[in-house]
Image (tube, rainbow, N blue to C red):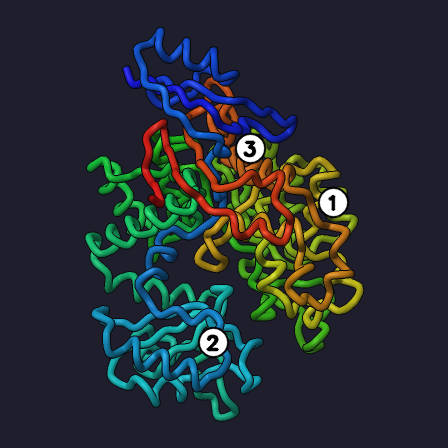
Amino acid sequence: MNVMGFINARVYAFFKPLRLYEGFVVFNDKVIYTGNNTDVVQLTRDLGGNVIDLKGKTVLPGFIDAHLHLDSLGLSLVTLDLRGVKSIDELKKKLKLYSESSSFKWIIGRGWDQELFIDKRYPTKLDLDEVVKDRPVILIRTCGHVAVLNTVALELTGLAAYDEKEVEKDTCGNPTGLIYEEAVQIASRKFMESITINELTELLKKAQYYLISHGITTVGFVSCSLKSLKALLEMWVRGELKIRVRLYVNPFDNELNLVELLRSIGLKRGFGDEYLKIMGLKLFADGSLGARTAWLTQPYEDDQSTNGYPAFEPDNLRKISKLSDELGLQLAIHAIGDKAIETVLSIYRELKNIKHLRHRIEHVSVLRDDELEEFSKLGAVAVVQPHFIISDWWADRRLGSKRIKWLYRFRSMIDNGIPVAFSTDAPVEPVNPWETIYAAVTRGKYDNIAFYDDIKHESINVIDALHSYTYGSAYAIHEENVLGSLLPGSYADFVVVDRDPLETPDHQLKNIKILETYIGGIKVYSNE
């Protein structure tokens, strides 16, 4: 038996309703008791366990990031980081330095945002060719829906001859190097083909440790490819998988139809064990606001020529969604623009198992009042990324004064009974959950967000934010009975932090530090 009693702590075992205790007892990998110090010590000694004095520190359930890209996160930790770059010249200098040290055949980077550039334009293949001519280069925008390739990469991916709107052409019909949506996926897959399973496994390990160091104990891995699944299985077999991973796979992987494969073998949601489970499918209804590919009902305020477009033909999206529902697989559909959300809601209205399977809508960025009401009736889950509020500091340019009030409506969702789960879409947004909580609570109040006054009514309190990051995310992955709390029967996944978040001023929330992380009662991280 592995028995431990933790005492002298402020243990937030649950947030809504708030349940605060002095300590708790862990038997093997689960919590069996929460209560006062005296009873914890007595029960621990009766069971022959060890008592650990936490000396007044604060304990919370482990964070559950319901939507991130585990493979891309691992890759981002070893590739070119372009976040915060202020000009194309700075981008080129960083690319040159990185190219001189990178061992990958391909050069890949992520994080640039043209809205920050003093040049006031997108980078092109000519910019990249000036720096790297003999190796393929792909630099992905922060949102993940736009990228720029050099000439070599355009040729190797076949995108140079791609005659679709996802590959931008100049007036002479030549590719500029800018690619969007499906073309980004084509380029990314080509890069991933160059990585071995062993290399991918090492990247996943890096991502795993990085997550644990930030207090994240369970993740929803969306857009998981077969190659990444194989690497995760290698880790699982060798006992190297420390965090709990819930998978939402791509419906198609190169020429393979995964929906048909899952149907042929009869695999349903929840297949796996406590560390690795397949949950369902990740689909796309549209793109991103930053790339102006999110699908809006009306044109963009700063480009009246477009209102975005569907990433998947609605009829095909409906067909796959119905099949997934019939097969017992949970849906996680990316929908940012109000037209995309409207489309997904209309599809969900036709499904038989929406409440049973808890089908999800990812991002839910621009939500109209009528959609809010429809959402609350359906019983679907909203999986949101609060840090977008700060990253999308330019959103009022895209949406204008009326629609900006529809942006990231967390308060309205919660008040209308919509189940809300928190996440980061990492590596799109920072993994650190305290930055996410800070964004949800302050909504740009301290970050010079020009439209703060238009959206401040959608701010939530710390308790709601912590509830959404624990129980809310556990609910999104069907595991609220064993994850997301420290009540008896739950896995002993928890973090020790350096201060009480409920007593921390809102402007200091992002400065809270993780001191220790435990998964299944085992300490997997310490900053000491």
User: Secondary structure under badge 3?
Assistant: helix
User: How far apart are the two marked residues, 1 and 2, measured between alpha carbons?
Assistant: 34 Å
Residue that appears at 38% across and 46% down: 213
Residue position for label 3: 471
Residue that appears at 47% across and 51% down: 432
Residue position for label 1: 412
User: What kind of residue is marked 3?
Assistant: Tyr
Residue 317 seen in the figure? no
Q: Callout 1: few (<14), some (14-19), or many (20+) C-alpha neighbours within 10 Å?
A: some
- Residue 126 locus on image (x, y percent): 40, 89
Left or right relative to 72: residue 145? right
Q: Nearer the viewer, residue 481 or 467?
A: 467
Residue position for label 2: 85
Left or right relative to 58: residue 438? right
Residue that appears at 76% across and 62% down: 403
Front of the two marks 3 and 2: 2
User: How far apart are the two marked residues, 1 and 3, measured between alpha carbons?
Assistant: 18 Å
User: What kind of residue is marked 1?
Assistant: Ser
Left or right relative to 221: residue 504? right
- Residue 492 locus on image (x, y percent): 41, 26
Q: Does residue 309 lie above or below 481 as drawn?
A: below
